[in-house]
């Protein structure tokens, strides 16, 4: 099993020496990102409950995650995340997401609430502007994630469908590593947490996978979560239940034929 990427303090992230690549490369200092994120969150009225930082490649790649005190949902709170590099291996990324209370799993959506910028030209000014834009639209992005969660709670997966999802995320989409596949399988068999939903729901499966994505490298953490969320929303979101399923039981009154269920790859019980 590969070693886990440890957490670092804010001061350690700030202490990383700036690069000197020259040419058109525009440095986006980790410390400037932290300052601007915290300032914009405070200005928008958000309170940071917890903050987490990871470094890799001798500090040339950094990741920051902030759990915010916002909303009254029983499952998820708001999150802001960013990733930055000094070694030309990745673009700066930032976005609004959510974190699941019981396990601190991350939730990020790829088609909204995220931004990526190449390190060139006016990169620093653009990064500052986009952090402001993301925070300004934070409530809208968060509400959309809550809607996605509700949809996934209403989709029930068979063991075969779970296996197909796991296989596609590993072999086809390359979101999961082989080690992470093992973690997901272990969570499916004996979950570390309960997620306030049917144990066979797509939301439970989603969280088994994001539990494994905690081991993602800082350079791929955001993109891995965005790709996963898009996969689940596109895979399951095409089906709208006629009647909302009760997550505490197994009686589902949904008007779909077996052939329609098989066509979309999901089963409602």
Image: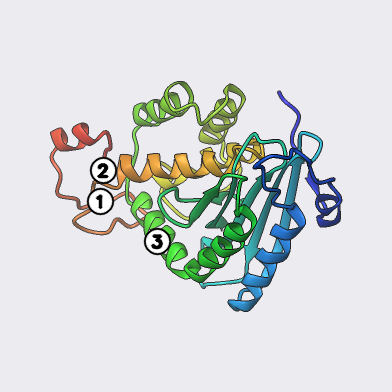
Residue 93 is situated, as x and y percent measured from the top left of the image, at 58, 49
Q: Which residue is mark 1?
A: 252
Q: Residue furthest front?
A: 23
| Label placed on residue 268 | 2
Say how many tags the image has. Answer: 3
How many C-alpha atoms fall within 10 Å of the one at disc 1: few (<14), some, or many (≥20)? Answer: some
How many C-alpha atoms fall within 10 Å of the one at disc 3: few (<14), some, or many (≥20)? Answer: some
Please state which of the two labelled residues, at mark 2 or mark 3, is closer to the viewer: 3
Q: In the image shown, does 245 or 223 lie closer to the viewer?
A: 223
Residue 57 is situated, as x and y percent measured from the top left of the image, at 77, 33
Query: Secondary structure under badge 2?
Result: loop
Residue 186 is situated, as x and y percent measured from the top left of the image, at 57, 30
Please state which of the two labelled residues, at mark 1 or mark 3, is closer to the viewer: 3
Is 30 on the left or on the right of 247, as rendered? Answer: right
Q: Is residue 101 visible?
A: no
Is 191 on the left or on the right of 244, as rendered? Answer: right
Question: Residues under labels 2 and 3: Cα distance?
Answer: 23 Å
Going 54% across and 61% down the picture, which residue do you hit?
130
Q: Are marks 1 and 2 in contact (CB under 8 Å)?
A: yes
Question: Residues under labels 1 and 3: Cα distance?
Answer: 24 Å
Q: Is residue 259 visible?
A: yes
Question: Residues under labels 1 and 2: Cα distance?
Answer: 7 Å
Q: Earlier in the sequence, mark 2 or mark 3?
A: 3
Going 82% across and 54% down the picture, which residue do you hit?
14
Going 68% across and 65% down the picture, which residue do you hit?
36
Q: Earlier in the sequence, mark 1 or mark 3?
A: 3
Q: Which residue is mark 3?
A: 144
Q: Is 106 located above or below residue 228 in the figure? A: below
Query: Secondary structure under badge 1?
Result: loop
């Amino acid at each position: 099993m590969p070693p886990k990427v440890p957490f670092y303090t804010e001061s350690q992230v700030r202490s990383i020496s700036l690069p000197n690549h020259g040419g058109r490369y525009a440095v986006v200092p980790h410390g400037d990102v932290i300052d601007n994120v915290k300032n914009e969150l405070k200005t928008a009225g958000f309170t940071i409950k917890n903050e987490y930082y990871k470094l890799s490649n001798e500090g040339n790649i950094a990741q920051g995650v902030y759990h915010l005190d916002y909303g009254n949902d029983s499952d998820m709170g708001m999150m802001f995340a960013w990733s930055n590099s000094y070694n030309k291996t990745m673009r700066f990324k930032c976005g609004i997401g959510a974190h699941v209370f019981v396990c601190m799993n991350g939730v990020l959506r790829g088609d909204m609430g995220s931004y990526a910028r190449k390190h060139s030209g006016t990169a620093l000014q653009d990064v500052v502007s986009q952090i402001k834009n993301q925070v300004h639209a934070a409530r809208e992005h968060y509400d959309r994630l809550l809607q996605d969660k509700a949809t996934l709670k209403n989709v029930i997966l068979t063991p075969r469908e779970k296996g197909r999802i796991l296989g596609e995320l590993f072999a086809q989409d390359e979101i999961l590593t082989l080690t992470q596949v093992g973690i997901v399988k272990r969570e499916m068999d004996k979950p570390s947490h309960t997620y306030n939903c049917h144990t066979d729901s797509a939301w439970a499966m989603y969280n088994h996978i994001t539990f494994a994505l905690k081991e993602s490298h800082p350079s791929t953490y955001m993109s891995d979560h965005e790709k996963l969320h898009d996969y689940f929303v596109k895979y399951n979101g095409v089906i709208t239940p006629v009647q909302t399923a009760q997550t505490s039981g197994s009686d589902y009154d949904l008007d779909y034929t077996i052939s329609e269920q098989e066509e979309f790859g999901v089963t409602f019980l």
